[in-house]
């Protein structure tokens, strides 16, 4: 990570300007004269290189020049806002400690990086944070181009040198650096590895210089550390886990773009990192604690066969206060796994409920507690308590205020409950708190003692998507809190390292933690080959969850799995179980996740709709689309099965849940349908009934045409149920965009024969021709597709097979599972 580069540079300059090197005879003219060397010094060098002897005055001038260069590199003598770092003692050494470490400025540096590299057959994803201590040695003398003029001691340039501090250096401000990392790499043949761990000795070394081109400082150097963690390697045959393994990174961090090899006389490039000269100088001159930040984004950065893109950031805090309030979870594992659930004892939770107690639907939430403790960073830590909590290492206490802030404030408890919801803070301090805590309000508690050294507080949620931050302050001592996890002044609730207000545990459970998705992401692409991505529900909405009907017909709370698109349905009427079988058949054929709503109260009305169908009505800052459930009912006895579009929607156009008013599955009409087809078989077959194709199909399948009718009549109730189950699956296909096979060809026929259309008055011959055309169109195509009209097949073999009991509609007539063919998939979608 080039952390040693500044130190190597400074040593190189000292060597370059030594008299032995500069005055060696026999060297070609100008080959030993560094670019930018002052003319009088360059003249002496050239004279010596040509074999001339330097005079005493020449040697004195060279010595004075080289000494000034060395002082410029290390920093000038302290004078006003300028500082003279020690040139004979190492920062952190005993000699420097005796001097009070006054030559430099103590700093805390935090680096955050997140990048991805992609190659032909490999990839690398890396996220890390580093925290390290360093000493800053600034030289403030203008904003000229440092590298172009660095051989001139009088150049108007500035530089800022950061030296690392070792954890065991003995310096009062020294402390071991730390951090965390996660790395995912893929190789050929599907092999990949996952590495997760921490940095035990993060160190930081850097030089910032002016460029003469504006306010930005050009950096070199970087951050590094010994990583200790676990690496799991996967290939086709095996999985191998290595604990206590280290991990490296391919890029120079955090200054990925500033990797040019610069030397004396080189024009300094414009940096990508946004570190400000003016901001850093102001922080230096302030004399107090101050923080300067910078960031850079990079893309199309090629190295080692991979093309990299990502971002990095750096935060430099000058003169950090040694006293701080550490904030930590009481139970680390619980905190890392915690997802918000409404507190059932919350007095306000019932105010959010208008129709049922919260306990009926939601699991009992785990209590979440946090510990705040006074800590002196300049002193050695004391042994933790028996339960692993940090103990105070100072006798200086104070009144500690603990706050919740940036807390979510949303309608309801989850996305579809309750219907008439109020807006409340999602996180709160309950009245009941551990001893030593005084409750001020829902967002503020404080220690009872004015000299407290530590305290424990409880936090509850009333929203399944609640989020916020907890921090602490001691006004008397002027202290803010600091997370034990990093240098943040707060802890996120829930744990949320990617800052999308979604619990990291949910993302890990669903295999998306490494993808760092935004809260409003809605790009599911499974099942594949659909008309568009997404399902009308954002990632945050799916995480916040819904009340659904479980397989036991019990209403429960459910967070959704984001791996697939999702469809919600409501099943109304006495044939609820039959409808559910059909929805499950559709689920298996389509590859969608299908969720069922238990109660119409979990939906709100939509404009012009027959029924309430809006099911993500408790909107959030991350809501993007008003999604609807599909309502399935038996409301029209004139239609066997029908997907009714919303007013103004063309029946032939591909529909979606929002444009689908309702699905009608009529038991009386399906019963009539089965009864009528049964009449095509003896003994009910009239003498003049058109049954040659049915009879031929029976003969071809070895079925006794004369006697099969009684068997079919006895099976009529079962046949009706099968037909209704299939029809639900077929109509749900329509509700998600699938169309009848060759429907465009049939529409062309109707357009060319207007008398056969809905407004026409066809003759019997015209009506028969239209029915024949529809049968040929709708029965064409893939026999495994749910949208094909199998009962219109030319030889009626599938219809006979169904009625005779040779074929059950749970599978296609081919014996294969039902599916949707490519001609239907291209129209299927869940958002209009």
Image: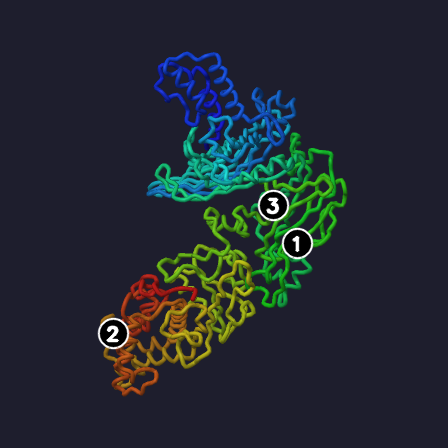
Question: Is the residue 705 above or below the residue 310 in the image?
Answer: below
Residue carrying label 3? 491
- Is there CB contact under 8 Å for labels 3 and 1? no
Q: Is 210 on the left or on the right of 304, as rendered? A: right
Question: Is the residue 460 above or below the residue 740 in the image?
Answer: above
Choose mark 2 or mark 1, whichever is in front.
1
Question: Is the residue 205 above or below the residue 181 in the image?
Answer: above
Give x and y (percent) for residue 548.
Answer: 52, 63
Residue carrying label 2? 794
The answer, for residue 227, to whether it is visible in the render is no
Return the disc, 2 or 1, that comes first in the chain's sequence: 1
Q: Disc number at residue 428?
A: 1
The answer, for residue 758, to whether it is visible in the render is yes
Return the disc, 3 or 1, that comes first in the chain's sequence: 1
Mark 2 to mark 1 CA distance (whole Å): 68 Å
Return the disc, 3 or 2, that comes first in the chain's sequence: 3
Q: Is 566 on the left or on the right of 348, as rendered? A: left
Mark 3 to mark 1 CA distance (whole Å): 15 Å
Tag 2's secondary structure?
loop
Tag 3's secondary structure?
strand
């Amino acid at each position: 990570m080039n952390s040693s580069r500044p130190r190597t540079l400074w040593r190189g300059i000292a060597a370059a300007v030594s008299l032995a090197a500069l005055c060696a005879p026999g060297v070609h003219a100008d080959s030993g004269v560094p670019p930018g060397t002052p003319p009088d010094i360059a003249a002496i060098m050239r004279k010596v290189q040509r074999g001339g002897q330097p005079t005493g005055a020449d040697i004195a001038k060279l010595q004075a020049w080289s000494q000034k260069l060395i002082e410029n590199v290390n920093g000038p003598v302290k004078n006003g806002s300028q500082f003279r770092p020690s040139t004979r003692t190492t920062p952190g050494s005993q000699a420097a400690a005796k001097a009070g470490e006054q030559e430099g400025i103590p700093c805390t540096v935090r680096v955050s990086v997140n990048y991805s590299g992609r190659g032909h057959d490999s990839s690398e994803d890396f996220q890390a944070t580093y925290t390290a201590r360093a000493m800053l040695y600034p030289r403030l003398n203008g904003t000229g181009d440092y590298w172009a003029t660095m051989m001139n001691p009088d150049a108007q340039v500035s530089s800022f040198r950061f030296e690392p501090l070792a954890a065991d250096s003995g310096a009062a401000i020294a402390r071991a650096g730390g951090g965390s990392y996660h790395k995912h790499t893929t190789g050929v043949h599907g092999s990949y590895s996952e590495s997760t761990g921490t940095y035990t000795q993060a160190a930081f070394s850097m030089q910032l210089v002016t460029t003469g081109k504006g306010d930005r400082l050009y950096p070199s150097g970087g951050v590094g550390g010994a990583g200790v963690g676990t690496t799991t390697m996967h290939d086709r045959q095996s999985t191998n886990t290595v604990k206590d393994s280290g991990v490296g990174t391919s890029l120079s961090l955090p200054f990925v773009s500033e990797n040019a090899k610069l030397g004396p006389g080189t024009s300094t490039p414009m940096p990508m990192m946004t570190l400000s000269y003016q901001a850093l100088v102001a922080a230096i001159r302030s004399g107090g604690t101050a923080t300067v930040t910078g960031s850079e984004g990079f893309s199309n950065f090629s190295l080692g066969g991979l093309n990299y893109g990502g971002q990095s950031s750096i935060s430099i805090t000058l003169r950090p206060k040694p006293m701080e309030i550490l904030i930590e979870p009481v139970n680390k594992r619980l905190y890392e796994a915690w997802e918000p659930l409404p507190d059932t004892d919350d007095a306000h939770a019932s105010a959010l409920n208008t129709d049922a107690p919260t306990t009926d639907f939601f699991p009992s939430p785990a209590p979440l507690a946090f510990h705040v403790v006074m800590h002196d960073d300049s002193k050695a830590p004391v042994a933790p308590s028996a339960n692993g909590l940090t103990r105070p290492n100072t006798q200086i206490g104070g009144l500690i205020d603990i706050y919740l802030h940036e807390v979510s404030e949303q309608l309801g408890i989850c996305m579809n409950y309750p219907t008439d919801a109020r807006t409340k803070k999602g996180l709160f301090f309950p009245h009941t708190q551990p001893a030593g805590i005084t409750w001020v309000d829902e967002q503020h508690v404080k220690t009872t003692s004015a000299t407290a050294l530590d305290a424990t507080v409880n936090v509850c949620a009333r929203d399944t998507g609640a989020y916020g931050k907890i921090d602490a302050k001691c006004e008397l001592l002027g202290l803010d809190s600091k997370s034990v996890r990093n240098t943040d002044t707060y802890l996120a609730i829930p744990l949320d390292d990617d800052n999308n207000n979604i619990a990291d545990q949910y993302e890990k459970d669903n295999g998306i933690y490494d993808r760092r998705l935004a809260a409003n992401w809605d790009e599911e692409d499974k099942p594949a080959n659909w008309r568009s991505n997404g399902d009308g529900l954002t990632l945050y909405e799916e995480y916040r969850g819904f009340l659904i009907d479980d397989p036991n017909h019990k209403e429960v709370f459910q967070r959704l799995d984001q791996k697939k698109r999702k469809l919600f349905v409501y099943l109304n009427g006495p044939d609820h179980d039959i409808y559910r079988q059909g929805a499950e058949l559709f689920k298996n054929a389509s590859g969608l996740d299908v969720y069922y709503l238990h109660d119409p109260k979990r939906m709100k009305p939509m404009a012009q709709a027959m029924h309430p169908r809006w099911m993500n009505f408790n909107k959030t800052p991350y809501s993007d689309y008003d999604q609807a459930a599909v309502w399935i009912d038996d409301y029209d006895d004139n239609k066997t099965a029908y997907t009714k579009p919303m007013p103004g929607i063309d029946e032939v156009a591909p529909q979606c849940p929002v444009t689908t008013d309702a699905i009608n599955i009529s038991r009386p009409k399906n019963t009539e349908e089965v009864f009528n087809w049964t009449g095509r078989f003896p003994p009910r077959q009239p003498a003049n009934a058109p049954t040659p194709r049915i009879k031929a199909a029976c003969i071809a399948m070895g079925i006794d045409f004369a006697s099969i009718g009684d068997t079919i009549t006895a099976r009529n109730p079962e046949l009706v149920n099968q037909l209704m189950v299939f029809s639900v699956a077929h109509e749900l296909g329509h509700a998600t965009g699938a169309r009848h096979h060759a429907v465009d060809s049939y529409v062309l026929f109707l357009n060319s024969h207007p008398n056969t259309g809905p407004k026409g008055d066809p003759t019997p011959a015209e009506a028969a021709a239209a029915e024949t055309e529809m049968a040929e169109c709708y029965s064409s195509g893939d026999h495994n597709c749910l949208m094909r009209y199998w009962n219109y097949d030319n030889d009626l073999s599938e219809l006979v097979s169904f009625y005779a009991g040779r074929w059950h509609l749970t599978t296609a007539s081919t014996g294969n599972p039902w599916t949707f063919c490519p001609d239907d998939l291209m129209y299927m979608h869940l958002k209009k």
